[in-house]
Image (tube, grey):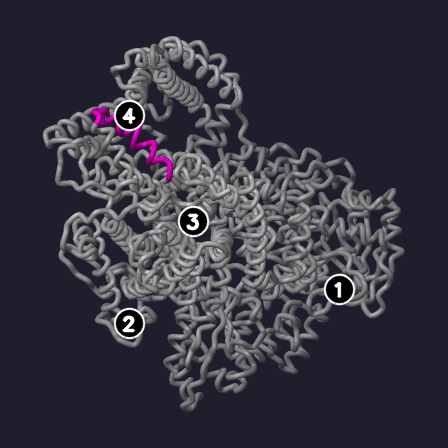
Amino acid sequence: MKIRRYGVAVAVAAAGALLFSACSSSDDSPKSTTTGAATAKTGGTITVAEVNAFFSFNSLTANGNTDINSKVSLATQSGFNYVDDKLTLQKDPSFGTYEVVKQDPLTVKYTLSDKAQWSDGTPVSADDLLLAWAVESGWYNDGTTNADGKVTKGTNYFDYAGSTLGLNDTKFPTVSDDKKSITIEYTKPFADWESAYSVQGIPPAHVIWKHAGLANEDAFIKLLQDQPKGDPSKPAKTNATLKKISDYFNTGFDSKTLPSDPSLYLSDGPYIVSAIDQGKSLTLVPNTKYQGDHTAKLDSIVIRTIADPQAQIQALQNGEVDVIAPQANADTLAALDQVPGVQVHKGNQLSYDHIDLNFSGVFKDKNVREAFLKTIPRQAILDAIITPLDSSAKVLNSQLFVPAQEGYADSVANNGSSAYGEPDIDGAKKLLNGATPTVRILYNSDNPNRVDAFTLISQSASKAGFKIKNEGDVNWGSRLGDGSYDASIFGWISSGVGVSGVPQIFGTGQSSNFNGYSNKSADAAMSKLIQTTDKSEQTKLQQEIDKDIFSDAYGLPLFQSIGVDAESSRVGGIDTFNPNQNGVWWNVWEWTVKS
Amino acid sequence: MLSYIVRRLVASFFILLGASFIVYLLIAYSGDPLAEIRSSNSPSKDTQIAVRTEMLHLNVPPVLRYFIWLGGASKCLIGQCDLGVTLQNQPVTAALGQAIPATLQLLTAATLLAIVFGIAIGVVTALRQYSTLDYAVTFMSFLFFSLPVFWVAVLLKEFGAIKFNNFLATATISPGVIVALALVSGVVWAVIVAGTWRRRGITFAVAAVVTALVLVFLSATKWFQTPSLGPVVIAVTGVAIAYGATVLFAGLRNRRALYSALISVGIGLVAYFALQPVLDRTGFWGLIGLLVIALAVAWAIGHFMGGYDRTQSIRAAMLTTFGMSLLIVIDRFMQSWQSYSDNPLVRGRPIPTIGSKIPGLDGDFWITGLDTMTHLILPTISIILISLASYTRYSRASMLEVMGQDYVRTARAKGLSERVVVTRHAFRNALIPLATIVAFDIGGMIGGAVITENVFSFQGMGQLFLTGIKSIDPNPVMGVAIVTGITAVVFNLLADLAYSALDPRVRVKA
Amino acid sequence: MTSPLSNMDEVSPAPASPEPEEQVRGLSQGRIVFKRFMDHRGAVIGIIVFLLVLVLAISSIGLGPIPGWWKYSYKETPDIVNGGHPSLQFFPFHLGDHPFGQDRVGRDMFAMTMRGTQISISIMIIVGVVSALIGILIGASSGYFRGKVEAVLMRFTDMIIIIPSLIAAAVIAKSSQHLGGIWFLAVFLGFVSWTGMARLVRGDFLTLREREFVDAARLAGASNRRIIFKHILPNAIGVITVNTTLLMSSAILTETALSYVGLGVQAPDISLGKLISDNQAAFSTRPWLFWWPGLFIVVICLCVNFVGDGLRDAFDPRQKKFRLKKDKDDQRVAPVALEAPIDDALDGTSEAPGRP
């Protein structure tokens, strides 16, 4: 469940937010219904089961970017906006406001509210805003890494788990005199500007610069100002102070226990961490210094680590935990339905399973690819894996859109996916013309969904004369792209759905293009896509790409995954399924205990 | 002797070195630690790969990487252990420091109980070889042994926790259940008590009726919601313990021993009333202190009542006192039961299915003690069930072996009672070979119970090891392997020394 | 598996004991063992049930290319009938189309359970054979030759004991696909579970090598190899047989445990352990997916354990049925071994099942 920030971008795009409507949206009032502070406080404790154990107060680094760290940061850190369960960005003016001051070049001004302050009393200030920008833009990095992942020359400062695309093409922000606002000017138009820059999750800058021995905020701002933009082709000498700052950012906040130094777990959000039992539990209590709108309503939230899904269900059943989100399958869902006093929410996740064919080896010939795709029993796979969870589920027919998106229906109508509706064994035989090619299929043999998909595909493909060789492997991940297989079944999380993720998968020679796909017209459309800021133009380009992919017999999307969460009936405030990686945590401040 | 130990330790050092090398290579070659990142479509893929490569020295070949690890580990010799960091950037030493106590907490009670029950059952079945009891117990222990652990765990959670907690809401037992339990209890007792069919029939009837009456009483008083023993039950049980201890150590003919034990019961009852206010404010070490005082008093009773064979009286008195102390403590815990159960974090469902304690629970020693115990109940039962078989089989075999020895025949021939033959001559000798097994098992305890820890969400050594293996994270795996390796080696040595100390025929080659 | 003699290296055993007297004259050792074994009710039932399971598993779905009498193969995915519910009925008895039900893609659970049984029994036997072979070889060499050979081999054994088998399994699980799947897994499990056997065999050899018949053979000019395999080994067969059966029953459970943590048999191969760990979520909702394979594991394990128990009683001449108290006047019971050293005695009797 990584790439949270990226997920935000995708989420926003998926929900069809109008990208350049800032003028109208900046004065939107928050949807929060509880402006009065302690009035709605209900007290009580809610216990949440999570699979992973908390280990870092900085969830933005490559290492700390795990779902659980991000979830804790949602409760303990505020930002200019957050993503709601409809995958739209909601603003939090009690933390700060932002507005587009100029369209060309794109210039955005971020202004902090007076209420925004850390739990040690320090106001959130320009140093925090600049740190966020420095981290998320990757501006100072001039390192070059070799194939082994080793930095050969230059220096990489901040490890950032998200994409630095877009923010990297900005000028150094201007800071206002009262240090309450900064203005970011983009040198190129950038579609995902609203979600790309976020302060949420950034550790307190004043703790970091103090650690690096800087005297005050001004010194920190000056340090960032004076450091030129990094250029990997002409690496500069390492700036020792900046390196010290970035090292502290990268690893200083990693801790499995509650640090003895409280500045390591400051909060500017509704809750603050009060206790950690290493690997077992984490306790959140209301942040008394918090003045914003997202007032905490509970006395405490306890997170308990339970890795085994069956154990999660039984713990919920036994009343030991109140909220669980186990991996969804028909049996867990049926088991949860049997538990009295439990409400279950399910919905489509931002991930989908697909089968990809290599554009080499046995599948070099397009007829063979097409023949193989014709044999894939997508409806049967859906019926086995997804239908028991959601009887209205349908086969996914686009590589770039999910059904909830506007462009999906149009794209499906034109992209040629209808040719693969039901398995067409005769059609496949005709295309094969008597040949019996051997196909090696790679999948994760530890994932029952992939195993069952493989079983059904191999059964059906054998009927058309394909000889299927099973390449199921626990180590499938490191084999991707190594040519030891012909077809692969796996899943993408929220990619292929967003704009900037598209070339990464389908672009020629890109890092996640494992099957060697290359199509000139699609490449051209993709490079246009990233630069395009107009939503309808984006959709049109994506539909073109989708069509190219299908007509090249790239592979087939199989189904969109289903997620589930379940709460005991005493929990209030969790009313819908949230499809992104934050799960139930997106509105943690609205949680209550029903009496 | 000393040179033997030194030689063994030196050899052990090299064994550990060799084993650690092999383990390191195995884990290094068990997969690609970057696989998860490689297969993702994360935009910062390259950064993530670089960070992890840097962290795990992945650009160094595994054979050389081992020496990087060894360099850090060898600092342990000068007291600055550096066993590397986990993928979560936590020092392995810190992770071990948390995992070892958790594992010991989980396994100590379970292992000790399994040993005690296993030996007791094994000895009894050996004495009644090929009886119905023997077959029944053998069948049951093999059955439990054959059940997969996670299966046992799921069933225990379903019936021992969820259903039992539901039952506690009313705490009334339905008549059907009472009848069924009474019949089961009757059958069990009839099997245990050997003899003629007539005798068994009577046993069956008595056991069934008594069980039914007790259950009716417990149900009517909602005993399970507000459990307590009270002075009467303590007194009756205490007297039974006194007789049992006397039979075991001295035989009922030794009146002085019996009286010592009975006096201990009397003093225990007085202490029960006198100590209540003290117990309210005591902690763990206070309890230990009280126990020491009680045992000292018992020793004195035995010593002064003793007569010609004082040790018999002392033993009987001390065992009885120990039993009484236990009863008093149990009673005190029961007094706190309701306030524990009513705690807003417990909400009337006291038997948990996961973890080692309720996070954030406030309370005195008795409340937190209850919390720990309730959390340990289910994992302990599951560990006992599966490890019972091996102890039962070991001790049964050992006991059978000894019972066929000449000295047992000699003992019988000279007219000793069967009690003396069994307890003095056979049982003690049967324990000798068991000492080795027990020492070895206790040594192996620290390695944790991988699957039990996983299903019960206990964050111990087993869990640390398992997550390390799954994410191909070599450092925690090595940490666990080294700790278990060292304990295995040490206890192996202790077992050998104990064996030669207990059995003079086995000599240690100096 | 740890032996009671755990690492009694350099602890010299007591002097050899005289041969136990034969209970009944005129019967060969094999005959006596057989007779005693047949007296053990549990063991006889165990072996019968085990053979029945084996015959069922092989005949129903066949073995390799040979087809069996059951209509479905474990690979087929027929249409799901009646929501996958089992069609087996006992009153009146009725097998139906899918007696054990179907999984979610429609595979027949009966065929899968039978396939799982075949695989699990194969793993069990391979682990038993491999670890017995290695254990005997290492144990016999170190017990017979003593000195440097013993020191080196026993240190090696200690090292293998320290290496956690879970790690070994992890390596295997992740590479077994390319190396022959379950066969490789089974052989490798055998490679890490021979240590107990080696120690027991060594213990037995330590005492047996001092016996007169070994001296006699040596005087007659027999080679070391001949002495080890022809003279001493047959005398240690009891220890070996018993230990092997117990190793086998714990092999099934080890494999189940490995499957639970995802390191056992890899899909699409099936084993009983994998079936139940894959279907553990179905425990309360589609119990047949879970209970049938589970039942087979328990039955196989129980049988093997009982057979091992029976073999131990049968091989050990010193263990007699004896009745408390009545012994004294029961003259028919022959005197048992004199001065049998306890460590020696235990070698054969006390290797109880170990848990993974």
In the image, which disc is placed on residue A70?
none
Q: Which chain is disc 3 placed on? A: A
Measure the C-alpha gap from mark 3 to mark 2.
35 Å
Nearer-the-camera pick, A150 or B78? B78
Q: Which residues are magenta?
A: B414-433
Dot 1: what SS?
strand
Dot 3: what SS?
helix
Nearer-the-camera pick, A106 or B438? B438
Residue wearing tag 1: A151
Q: Residues within 10 Å of mark 3 (few under 14, many from 20)?
A: many
Residue wearing tag 2: C63
- In which image quadrant can residue A552 be found? bottom right
Instruction: Kindly indicate whether the residues beneath marks 4 and 3 are on one polypeptide chain.
Output: no
For the residue marked with disc 3, what is the amino acid?
Answer: Gln
In the image, which disc is placed on residue B219?
4
- In which image quadrant can residue C13 be found? top left
- Magenta region's main secondary structure? helix
Q: Is residue A285 above or below residue B95?
A: above
Q: Residues within 10 Å of mark 1 (few under 14, many from 20)?
A: some
Residue wearing tag 3: A310
x and y percentages locating residue A211 in the rendered image = 80, 44
